[in-house]
Amino acid sequence: MIYLDNNATTPLAAGVIRVMEKCLRENFGNPSSGHPPGRNARKAVERAREQVARLIGASPKEIIFTSGGTEANNMAIFGAAKRFKAGHIITSCIEHPAVLKPLKYLERTGFTVTYIPVNKYGIADPASVVRNIRTNTILVTIMHSNNETGALQPVEKIGRSSRERGILFHTDAAQSVGKIPVNVNKLRVDFLTVVSHKFYGPKGVGALYLRHGVELAPILYGASHEKGLRPGTENVCSIAGMGKAAEIAQKELKERVRNMRGLSRMLFDKLRGNIPGIRLNSHPSKRLPNTLNISFPGVIGSVLLDKLKHDIAASTGSACHEGRHTPSPVLKAMGLSDEDALSAVRLSLGRDTTEREIKRAAKAIVKAYHDLRLKT
């Protein structure tokens, strides 16, 4: 099977597996304990903190380990809300549910939220963010890249505007870190979400970048782990694996970008040359180098993937409830019709995707598509 669902999750890198195996055997101590086994576990955690920090241009002291992206997003959003107790928040209409659902909850408790629209490429306008800033705006949260379309958001411009006005700024960079260069200082963010399993690390671990000097109210209560913001004994071996994945990503990043961009272009060209009328649901260049969200005219994306289930692993943004398909809210926000949104498939390449696999995948997709069209 050709794996083209790397935006959902990535396989563990070999180096990550080795680090985690060693950690499982040797670093069994509680990292809060003062004896040698505990100190060894603490060293593993702090080494990982340094590795993750280097990948995003941060200081190790600015990295808070979490259970993943959802917790990191919740920590930033609810932590800011609890600090201010009331106010206005700006976000985009295409955020991940781990951002949108916390904001919907806050609306029910008295906060107000503005949802910025996106253009036909799925990109928010930074000027729209500025226009919607109010005197009581406490937080802006805009994702770095969209998980479905790969569209890159103008985070640097939004970060500059927010910083100038003294407004806290959070970006969910789950899909970007490890795929493209991400630097917290260049982006001028106060909080940034990092997810391990999107760049060949383990699941169940992530991190929140918290800019030095910025305060967050805790949303969990317990002991003083992770500056008191994430109490509970650290998941040492998964954190060590995340650190190693970050180290590998930093070394490979330029090559990853070059390879994935070239292969995704090859795949799209082969599909476009054999399937008239397909459309790319994203910006031609301002998107992740590994991501293709494509609408296939006249078919339902999930049906096409089902026909390919023995050849290709990929995904679609639509959901199926009780036998009924519903279009992706992200694609609808971009102006796609229900028909075009339901015909979309996301193909996300990885560091191990080969040219041979791309040629095989294109051939299989073209055949499956035309077989389906013959039946209609």
Image (cartoon, rainbow, N blue to C red):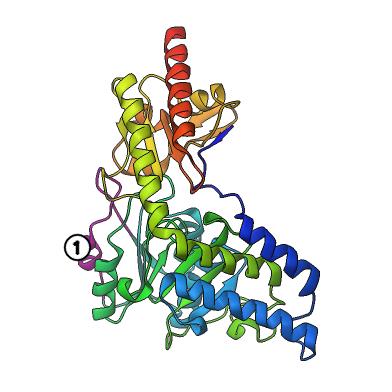
Res. 224 visible in picture: yes
Viewer can see residue 31: no
- Is 129 magenta? The answer is yes
Query: Dot 1, crowdedness within 10 Å: few (<14), some or many (≥20)?
Result: few
Helix, strand or loop: magenta stretch: loop
- Residue at point 58%, 27% (across, down): 309
Q: Is residue 72 left or right of residue 211?
A: right
Q: Label 1's element?
A: helix
Q: Position of residue 316 (x, y in %)?
A: 48, 36
Question: Which residue is depicted at the point 37% across and 39% down?
Answer: 264
Q: Looking at the image, which is closer to me, 344 or 259?
A: 259
Judging by the rendered image, the residue that carries numbered circle 1 is 127
Q: Quadrant of the N terminus?
A: top right
Q: Is residue 156 left or right of residue 142?
A: left
Residue 9 place in picture, x, y as percent:
56, 49
Q: Based on the displayed image, in which of its 4 quarters is residue 366 positioned?
A: top left
The verdict on residue 289 being magenta is: no
Q: Residue 13's quadrant in the figure? A: bottom right
Q: Amino acid at mark 1?
A: Ala
Q: Say if 134 sits above or below 91 in the image.
A: below
Quadrant in which the C terminus appears: top left
Q: Position of residue 5 (x, y in %)?
A: 52, 41
Q: Position of residue 122 (x, y in %)?
A: 30, 47
Q: Which residues are magenta?
A: 115-134
Looking at the picture, tell me which residue is in the foreground, 24 or 173: 24
Number of marks = 1
Relative side of 200 to 264, left or right: right
